[in-house]
Amino acid sequence: MSGTFSWTHLLIIALLFVVLFGAKRLPDAARGLGRSLRIFKSEVSQMQKEETPSTAPTPPPAQPLPPGQSAAEPVPPQPQQKSA
């Protein structure tokens, strides 16, 4: 049972918070924490809306390889035909 908290440990920690910060300051701190979490949540959701897959640039389609050539081999340049 090493590393776990029992209900008595949690009660002692809660009492220490009340003694250190006072009963009047704890509700204000909890309210401030709730506000900042709401702001953080709205910013994260806004960032996710901006990064939708439809707005992300798509890579150009891959060129098909000639028969008998693997992707590891470089593709030789195609000779250009001159018009006469």
Image: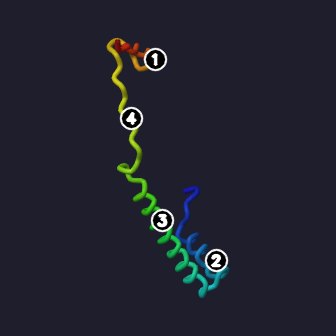
- List x then y, in percent, for residue 69: 38, 14
- In the figure, residue 28 lies in which quadrant? bottom right
User: How many badges with numbers are in the image?
Assistant: 4
- List x then y, in percent, for residue 51: 42, 54
The vertical placement of 76 against 35, above or below, is above
Label 3 secondary element:
helix
Residue drawn 65% across the image and 82% down it: 19
Crowding at mark 3 (Cα within 10 Å: few <14, some 14-19, many 20+): few
For residue 60, which numbered disc appears in the image? Answer: 4
Q: Amino acid at mark 1?
A: Pro
- Depth check: give the residue in front, 55 or 47: 55
- Depth check: give the residue in front, 15 or 72: 72
For residue 43, which numbered disc appears in the image? Answer: 3
The answer to which of marks 4 and 2 sits earlier in the sequence is 2
The answer to which of marks 1 and 3 sits earlier in the sequence is 3
Q: How is the image coloured?
A: rainbow
The answer to which of marks 2 and 3 sits earlier in the sequence is 2
Name the residue carrying label 1.
74
